[in-house]
Image (cartoon, rainbow, N blue to C red):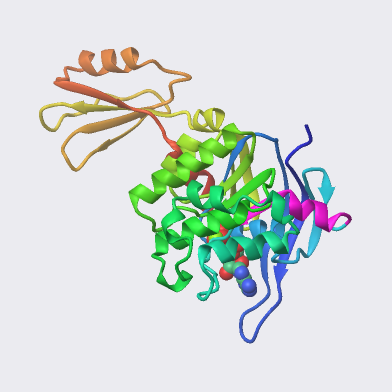
Amino acid sequence: MPDALQITGLRKTYAAQGNAPAKHALKGVDLTIKAGSIFGLLGPNGAGKSTMINILAGLVNKTAGQVVIWGFDQDVNPRQSRAAIGVMPQELNMDPFFTPRASLEVQAGLYGVPKSERWTDELLALVGLSDQANAYARNLSGGMKRRLLLAKALVHRPQILVLDEPTAGVDITLREMLWSNVRKLNEQGMTIILTTHYLEEAEQMCDEIAIINHGELVVRQNTRDLLSRTDGKTLVLDTGGPVALPPLPEGVRHERRTDGRLAITYPPSRLRADQLLDALRGAGIPILDVATEQPDLEDVFVELTRDK
Ligand code: ADP
Ligand code: MG
């Protein structure tokens, strides 16, 4: 099985326009994505995620670098590389005069899918638009338009599905439907690449995660290892009121939460919770209640994208 995607030295500079200077949106990104994974591409607004995805989709021309999709170099075998990938864009761009059925048929035509191999009705059912199959797109709700975009990305049965912020601003029902579709497609063997700024979602959905910031790849790891990067656990204590803390071991931080509880963050690689609790008890500090907090993706993300 080939890598789903190999990106080498990818650069994109948007030319200066009027008073706006040239923008280096991607500054030499290397990234390989294994076939069969659900891969999360994360980064703050303006990091370059959509630029990268639009380059994969053939919607934006790269300035430099190599993009190999399912073994096909985008510049050498444009047709095959395009056929291997389906992209659900971030923007809702659709022709208001097409019905969902017509949209899917037109899209299939663009990809050269023969009539006998089209799966329009199945796709409409998959995304829950069977009842709206013949309604004009301008009469569809925002959520329905998004579902249609997902179906459009799938007309040519691509090996790789790319979703750019698929759940931004959508309600919980649609979000669940999207994710259950994504899981189902992945179980059938499709490689999924998605961007989201809902980190909890990425944490639950993705096997592997890359974070980009200012056009550069900051990290790329499997989700479990990424989460264990931050060497910090937190004990949250109810001390029944203000207390004077004894000197704490190096690397331990503390803060008083607005609810009055005392949060003590320590490096679990060097210190155990019972050692910390013993030190506190030894100093006569009452501990009425203890809770523990693990770092989540949000913490890792903030740490890695903090401007230094
Ligand atoms: P993200 O999807 O991570 O939010 P984008 O890829 O949309 O980031 O944008 C990356 C940077 O490139 C941003 O600074 C953005 O303003 C700029 N940019 C994006 N598209 C264009 C464009 N068509 N022309 C000029 N600058 C652009
Ligand atoms: Mg974007």
Residue 18, can we see it?
yes
Q: Residue at x 76, y 59 (%)?
A: 112
What residue occupies the far right of the structure in this picture?
A: 76
In the displayed structure, would residue 59 be above or below residue 246?
below
In the displayed structure, would residue 64 be above or below residue 268?
below
Q: Position of residue 158 (x, y in %)?
A: 68, 47
Q: Residue at x 71, y 51 (%)?
A: 116
Name the residue nearer the viewer: 248 or 167.
Answer: 167
Q: Is residue 209 left or right of residue 138?
A: right
In the displayed structure, would residue 136 be above or below residue 125?
below
Residue 84: say if magenta.
Answer: yes
Q: Position of residue 245 (x, y in %)?
A: 23, 27
Magenta region: 76-87
What residue occupies the far bottom of the structure in this picture?
A: 18
Q: Position of residue 198 (x, y in %)?
A: 43, 48
Name the residue nearer the viewer: 96 or 241.
Answer: 96
Q: Is residue 270 left or right of residue 16?
A: left
Q: Residue at x 41, y 64 (%)?
A: 142
